Image (tube, rainbow, N blue to C red):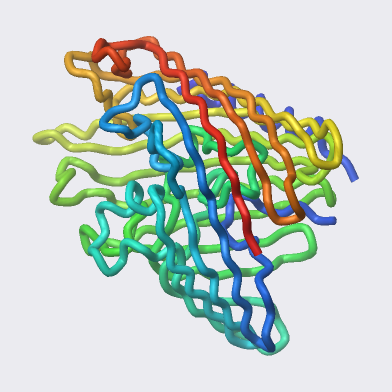
Amino acid sequence: MASIFKVLILWLLICNFFILNAQVTNSGIMDTLSGVKIDNLSIGGYIDAYIGYSSASQNSNVPYFVSSNKSNTFNINLAFIDIRYSDPDFRARFAPGVGTYMNANYQAEPNTLQNIVEASAGFRLFKNKEIWIDAGVIGSPYTNESAISKDHLMYTRSLAPEYVPYYLSGIKFSIPINKKINLYAYLINGWQQIQDVNKGKAIGTQVEYRPTNLNLINWNVYIGDERSQVSPQNRMRYFTDVYWIYNPDGKFSITSCAYVGNQKQTFTSTIMDNYWWQANFICRYKLSLDWSITGRIEYFSDPNNIQIASLSPNVEKGTSLYSGGICVNYKVREKAILRFEGRYFNSKKEIFISDEGTPSQHMLWIISNMTVWF
């Protein structure tokens, strides 16, 4: 654990070093479409199409990912219509979606709930204060990458967001403290659950801090009981992440995320503490108004396979995974972007299976994408 906290401390020092004097958009949320406005109603749309190849695909799936996870085929990662209503005291959002991301990420939900990107309604609690309460299926605050790729410096998601909730079901309180700090509190069914699996409730907190117009630092916490019929040994889960976004629209942009989780499990009368953690760093440089290049490095450690269980047979317990990648971005139009990306993964253990069917420590992932929105 000491090494985990050393990484988190180093990460925070790096963030403070870069703090400088248009406000930063939080790329960890799924609320960034402007849409076409008709009085109090707005309608937006989003399409994320891709084709990719993985050297270790399993039944045409890129292993360990739910986003853009089909290999060697033209496909839709995520497409949705975003319908919103808003007046000074009430707001509602309904965003039904389709795509391979929806298929892979909503498998545990009942059929009627498997196509909800978001469905929520909220109201302002006080006439003279911007304190809101929203209820329904809402976007998750965890990590700096959501399912909306257009807001990210690279096309594919880091390992980090693939192993935290992409969506939550419950109640969200929004409390602005001042121009720099926003607080949010969540009462939810559990860790990415629309339908509750154990009748218990979980809590989450989020602090958004904007020290300058070019920087955003976000800190999240999750606490909940994760026992279920599928995992009866699970007990309390504690999780926290911190991420930083610097100058996302500038010539030189950076984002980074670090987190650590603890899953308590019981076997007979023994309580076990299982930790997992990750850290990543992403940097983009604009070559011109339309062209940019992005690089990413990351590390994911899960010694007790709480989040990542090897797909290869006969691999001993524990996963550690490194990744590095480069992405070339081309802005086709104001609301359209074309991307070409390559990623290389390396593990200490043979957690991949190559195209020849043999266990491997490595995977190469090459992917191209076109995203349009309004």
Residue at x 79% of width, y 63% of height:
179
Report x, y in % for residue 191: 35, 52
- Determine whether 284 is above or below 191 in the image: above
Report x, y in % for residue 195: 27, 64
- Determine whether 367 is above or below 28 in the image: above
- Determine whether 247 is above or below 135 in the image: above
Frontmost residue, 193 versus 15: 193
Is residue 330 found left or right of 222 in the rendered image? right
Q: Quadrant of residue 256?
A: top right
Residue at x 65% of width, y 41% of height:
338
Residue at x 59% of width, y 50% of height:
28
Residue at x 63% of width, y 59% of height:
373
Report x, y in % for residue 20: 87, 40
Quarter of the image with the C terminus is bottom right
Report x, y in % for residue 31: 60, 62
Is residue 8 found left or right of 194 in the rendered image? right
Q: Quadrant of residue 14?
A: top right
For the view shown, which residue lies furthest in the front direction? 74
For the view shown, which residue lies furthest in the left direction? 268
Please count the marks in the image.
0
Quarter of the image with the N terminus is top left
Is residue 282 found left or right of 321 in the rendered image? right
Frontmost residue, 308 versus 190: 308
